[in-house]
Image (cartoon, grey):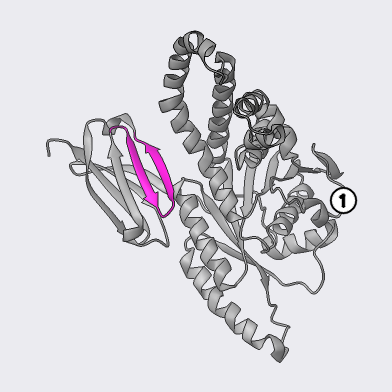
């Protein structure tokens, strides 16, 4: 199954672009599902049809789904949620407040993304188009599996062993309910699901990300940051979609200043995101709502091309052997040297860019080696590893 994620700053038209792509995929004969994981669903409005919590067939080869985050949360978080609710309630927290506290921020969206893993396992569709939340929320969600993996490997086994020994001794003397081994089992299942989701989203042969933007300063800057962080977490961005470009036939003087602004940022987008391809679609003189208008937009974006193809295949992370050791190269465009931090522990490299930190698991070939050099040049971070004695 081909998975394509569309993200971008709120209001740039990513839902419309995602829906248009899905319509074209279906008309090319692919069994296509377009799914919205954004809590503020607008997919049904774009398609101009009723869309349910489960895949709803709306045209030949085309299904749509607006994920009910609360329903997904119950499936993946129910028993853990029940335990946390009782924990907070035991400390005198109001029942309703305890219910709210038991659902960590962002957990609903994470549960929504679990649908990707479900559909991949089911094998019902050829193409899955995902209308993601606005950029910041999407980046947090895509980083979540890395955090979960670290917790699963480092913290979870220790906590589970300690609790198994301490629970029968300590529980009779305290009023706080301690988590049962069953709860730990459900936490483990949840974390494994997240890791499975990461394997799908992080496989460039299966999944790519496409950034939708408008030719405005704030939008372009946010798109650049998104591109950087997607590279940090090793997600492949294969296409930039520029939406709402003033067409040449618009010659009214009222739009002259706006056109000059768009032309300036159009050049910036071309150079800044290179070598990732950039495609454009014009600002239409009517609403892009309904299947026919979405098909019109898809033709404007993709022309005669198949939108399921991978437009760019350069993966951001690569390890290669060099004289005297190994070099890890990671693409980090649009950042300055002072914004990047590196921490090395045996088997792990931590790369920090601004507020985001990624743990990179190093191959066995680097065991016993230390970082001897780190440099950032032309948007590429190069970290050199050599024998500790060197």
Q: Please state which of residues 356 and 200 is positioned toward the viewer in this rendering.
A: 356
Q: Residue furthest bottom?
A: 253
Image height check: is 289 above or below 26?
below
Q: Please state which of residues 60 and 42 is positioned toward the viewer in this rendering.
A: 42
Image quadrant holding the N terminus, namely top right
Q: Please state which of residues 223 and 321 is positioned toward the viewer in this rendering.
A: 223
Residue located at (41% from left, 46% from top)? 357
Q: Is residue 361 magenta?
A: yes
Instruction: Give the secondary structure at mark 1.
Output: loop
Q: Where does the image place residue 304, in percent across and percent down from the top left?
A: 70, 59
Q: Is residue 317 magenta?
A: no
Image height check: is 110 above or below 383?
above
Note whether residue 320 is visible.
yes
Q: Specify start and end residues of the magenta stretch as a single range.
A: 346-362
Residue located at (34% from left, 48% from top)? 329
The residue to which callout 1 is attached is: 49
| Left or right placement of residue 384 versus residue 259 in this view | left
Mostly what secondary structure, the magenta segment?
strand
Q: Where does the image place residue 38, in percent across and percent down from the top left?
A: 69, 49
Residue located at (70% from left, 28% from top)? 75
Image height check: is 270 above or below 134?
below
| Mark 1 surroundings: few (<14), some (14-19) or many (≥20) residues within 10 A | some
Q: How many marks?
A: 1
Note whether residue 311 is visible.
no
Q: Residue furthest top?
A: 168
Q: Where does the image place residue 344, in percent across and percent down from the top left?
A: 28, 40
Image quadrant holding the C terminus, namely top left
Image height check: is 191 above or below 17?
above
Q: Where does the image place residue 263, in percent across and percent down from the top left?
A: 57, 79
Q: Quadrant of residue 119?
A: top right
| Left or right placement of residue 349 versus residue 58 in this view | left
């Amino acid at each position: 199954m081909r998975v394509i994620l569309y993200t971008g700053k709120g209001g740039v038209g990513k839902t419309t672009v995602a829906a248009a792509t899905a319509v074209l995929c279906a008309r090319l004969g692919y069994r296509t599902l377009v799914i919205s994981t954004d809590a503020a669903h607008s997919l049904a409005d774009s398609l101009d049809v009723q869309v349910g919590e489960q895949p709803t067939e709306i045209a030949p080869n085309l299904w749509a789904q607006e994920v009910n985050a609360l329903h997904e949360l119950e499936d993946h978080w129910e028993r853990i949620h029940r335990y946390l609710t009782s924990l907070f309630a035991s400390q005198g927290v109001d029942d309703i407040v305890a219910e709210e506290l038991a659902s960590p921020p962002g957990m609903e969206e994470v549960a929504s993304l679990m649908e990707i893993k479900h559909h991949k396992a089911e094998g019902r569709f050829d193409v899955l188009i995902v209308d993601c939340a606005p950029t910041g929320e999407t980046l947090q969600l895509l980083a979540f599996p890395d955090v979960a993996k670290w917790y699963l490997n480092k913290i979870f086994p220790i906590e589970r062993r300690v609790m198994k020994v301490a629970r029968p001794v300590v529980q009779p003397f305290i009023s706080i309910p301690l988590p049962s081994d069953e709860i730990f089992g459900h936490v483990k299942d949840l974390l494994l699901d997240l890791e499975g989701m990461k394997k799908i989203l992080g496989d460039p042969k299966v999944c790519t990300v496409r950034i939708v933007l408008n030719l405005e300063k704030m939008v372009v800057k946010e798109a650049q940051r998104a591109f950087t962080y997607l590279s940090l977490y090793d997600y492949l961005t294969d296409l930039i979609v520029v939406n709402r470009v003033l067409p040449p036939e618009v010659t009214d003087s009222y739009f002259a200043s706006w056109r000059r602004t768009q032309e300036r940022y159009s050049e910036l987008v071309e150079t800044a995101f290179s070598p990732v391809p950039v495609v454009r679609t014009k600002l239409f003189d009517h609403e892009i709502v309904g299947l026919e208008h979405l098909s019109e937009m898809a033709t404007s974006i993709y022309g005669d091309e198949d939108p399921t193809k991978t437009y760019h295949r350069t993966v951001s992370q690569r390890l290669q052997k060099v004289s005297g050791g190994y070099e890890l190269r990671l693409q980090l465009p649009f950042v300055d040297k002072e914004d990047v931090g590196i921490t090395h522990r045996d088997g792990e490299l931590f790369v920090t860019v601004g507020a985001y930190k990624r743990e990179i698991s190093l191959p066995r070939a680097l065991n016993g080696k230390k970082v001897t050099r780190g440099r950032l040049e032309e948007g590429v971070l190069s970290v050199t590893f050599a024998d500790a004695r060197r």
